[in-house]
Image: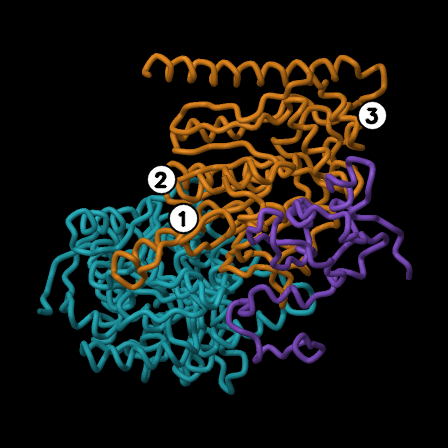
Amino acid sequence: MPSLQDMAKKEGAFAGGHRMCAGCPVPILTKMLTRVTDGYEIVAGNATCCLEVASSIFPYSAWKIPWIHTAFENVGASMSGVETMYRALKKRGKITKPYKFIAIGGDGGTYDIGLQSLSGAMERGHDLVYICYDNGAYMNTGVQRSSATPMGASTTTTPTGKQSYGRQGNRKDLSRIMVAHNIGYVAQASIHDPVDLSEKLKKAIELDGPAFINLLSPCIPGWKIASDMAVEVARLGVECKYWPLYEVIDGEYTINYTPKKEVPVSEWMFLQGRFKHLSKPAYSDIIDAIQKEVERNWHWLARQAASNALLSAEVN
Amino acid sequence: MSKIVAITGAGAMSECMRQINPDVVPAFPITPSTQVIEDFSQFVADGKVDTEIITVESEHSAMSACLGAAIAGGRVMTATSSAGMALMWEMLYIAASMRQPIILSLINRALSAPINIHADHSDAMGARDAGWIQLYAENNQEAYDNLIMAPKIAENMDVRLPIMVCMDGFIISHCVQTMQLEDDDKVKEFIGEFESTYPLLDTVHPATWGALDLQNYYIEHKRAQHMAMKNAKKIIQKVSAEFAAFFGRNYDLFESYRLDDAERVIIAINSVCGEIKEVIDDRREAGDKVGLLKIRSFRPFPYDEIAQALEGVKIVTVLDRSESMGAYGPLFVEIRTALFDASKKPMVYNRIFGLGGRELFMSDIHDIFDENKTYLKTGKVEKMFDYLKVRGG
Amino acid sequence: MKNKYRLKDWQELPIGGVVADGGNSADYETGTWRTSRPVWNAENCINCLNCWVFCPEDAFILKDGISKKGTPRKEIDRINYYHCKGCGLCARECPVNKKGKKIAIDYVKEEH
């Protein structure tokens, strides 16, 4: 497991002077792209998103490694092309070093408009790591809802109002969709736990084949939290079981962290301005619905992990 | 050895791709371009090429993967038609402005709706502003030759733009014609090795591709792209001259067929030109001074050269195989512009034909020459714009 | 710096919108964004590197040092105020700060 000391000794891929918001936790991810493994040339690609725009305002670039952005919905496809050209040139003897490829997108460019190209890339078996930093809305364009937006959140296209409590209905579970692609590695991680994230990133990169990491990544203006709160809010998001930390390796589930205390989801929600309206008594049933959904998901996950443990025990 | 073969247009594209042996081919099937990729897939499966094929899940992803692969640093080819081209529309612009010499076989087919799988030029014309070089072909030989020249044109360091090599769907793509298939080694020798620019896989000099431009830089980048397309015109001529020296067939920005002393001319694109040439030969026997200007390069459009070729011509019928609803046809508009500054302007008018595969027969082309004869005689263009061969008029 | 980033003519630009000098955002000053600033207190720092890993601006400059056991380790050298946006993540996540007895990273209003 790469420790902070291990990572600090290596060269980073991402320079300062970028234009991410003060307190944005996404650079916690970019900080470690080249610091979790050895022996590979790393090439990264981005969907259009906050990270892409803020890191590459011409003539500046924060990327110290080769990096490509083409459009919003296609980083899965673009990186498939890059990875395939690498294999083609390697086959022809024009490249000898081992390379690894990392595609990064927000939940907008991944859950919604980018879902098709992500699905294609994962299904075709490219040696590619896809990391989705899930901040629960199209943040780059001003906080519009995505299919990753949690129930009840106020976004600019699902605002609270006299006749609305915010985002209606439950969010989609992309991590499970990725597991259904039968790829070797799927994981959920959070920016508040960089050591856990670094281990998952290492596994994903070192795997030969497609890997997917879904990363909980709070947004300062989108979630309406103070600029020093992203890590704290992510931590609580995991503690209240909204965002379980788990891995699925060759289809077998392992929960990496089981919170010891029962923390109601509302405690996490009321740290954030986007859920503030739900504190009204009229919305208590929405709070209940959200809590129910979180528990339902957790129990489903726990059953997968338990049956996995059971099967392993039987085999052994 | 160079040899005569009987082959479909799509088959010719595929053979040429085999000879080029590109690094990566991302493709998604769509009628009638599918055979290009199917035949090529068989070459891959039999080890006749060592290209990596990516069977992508849509045409938008096909062009995205083409772009990623090209930027990574290698030669990339693909094929599509109609709705496939329409779906990759966003990425066409991006490929051109990211200056990647991607090579695409466009088997021209009508855009929906209604859904129709037959030939017209709405797919290519819809993409005419995307910044791609567009070359057109009357038959499978010309399309094959264009595809051989395509890498040399697109990859030239004064150009570095993507290129689409067009032919009519079904009429050319699926009909067997004879053509000269050149020798594999000669084709490879003509085309040469691929040279990359700021390849993404260069980790010693890491490049950032796809940065955001604010108002302070976008137009400068576009001006540079404009220069590249401007340069493409003379590079097309240069490469065509080199092709003639290598393989013995002559090409230019367009073909002037019996244009020298022609008084009445048709200007058209792709397969209908074959029939027009037959009709011209017929009518010339009877002393009728008619000619054809067959477009090869539509982008860049050779305004000056066309104006010069049409000197002395008295009337021009421009045949468009696509409509720009609410305006005159795409080719007509360019021809009119080319002729605007001519000291002696011919009469010019527009006819739309062939949409969704409604072919013109020889008799229809005779009718066109009869009509423009009447116009010339009366000195008046009765109808500046009309549809040909549509029931109801 | 002024000359390096002056607005260039179209002929001077590399092809296709490429930024050939990857990582040059380091030349861009984001320190002007601050309304508060962290102040690192070396005596109270345990070199856990939490601040370094959480800092979005890569503003914690490291140096080579020795742990208590005598093994080489990376240590905090200073804060790079050219890039620090003053978000306060470092001060909030500092474990020494959290214990409540000492302050390893103070967080004060920026003087303008």
Q: Position of residue A236 (x, y in %)?
A: 70, 28
Report the chain shown in purple: C
Q: Nearer the viewer, residue A313 or A255?
A: A313
C-beta proximity under 8 Å, tags 2 and 1 = yes
Type of residue at label 1?
Ser
Q: Are marks 2 and 1 on the same chain?
A: yes
* In this rendering, position of residue C36 left or right of residue A136: right
Report the chain shown in orange: A
Label 2 to label 1, Cα distance in Å? 9 Å
* In this rendering, position of residue A233 left or right of residue B62: right
User: Mark 3 highlights which residue?
Assistant: A277
Label 2 to label 3, Cα distance in Å? 44 Å
Chain of the residue that carries numbered disc 1 in the rendered image: A
Type of residue at label 2?
Arg
Q: Position of residue B327 (x, y in %)?
A: 56, 59
Q: Secondary structure at mark 2?
A: helix
Mark drawn on residue A124: 2
Chain of the residue that carries numbered disc 2 in the rendered image: A
Q: Nearer the viewer, residue B384 or B334?
A: B334
Q: Secondary structure at mark 3?
A: helix
Q: Nearer the viewer, residue A44 or A38?
A: A38
Q: Residues within 10 Å of mark 2 (few under 14, many from 20)?
A: some
Q: Residues within 10 Å of mark 3 (few under 14, many from 20)?
A: some
C-beta proximity under 8 Å, tags 3 and 1 = no
| Residue B355 visible somewhere in the drawing | no
| Residue A56 location, quadrant | bottom right
User: Mark 1 highlights which residue?
Assistant: A80
Which residue is pictured at 32% across the width and 15% down the height? A315
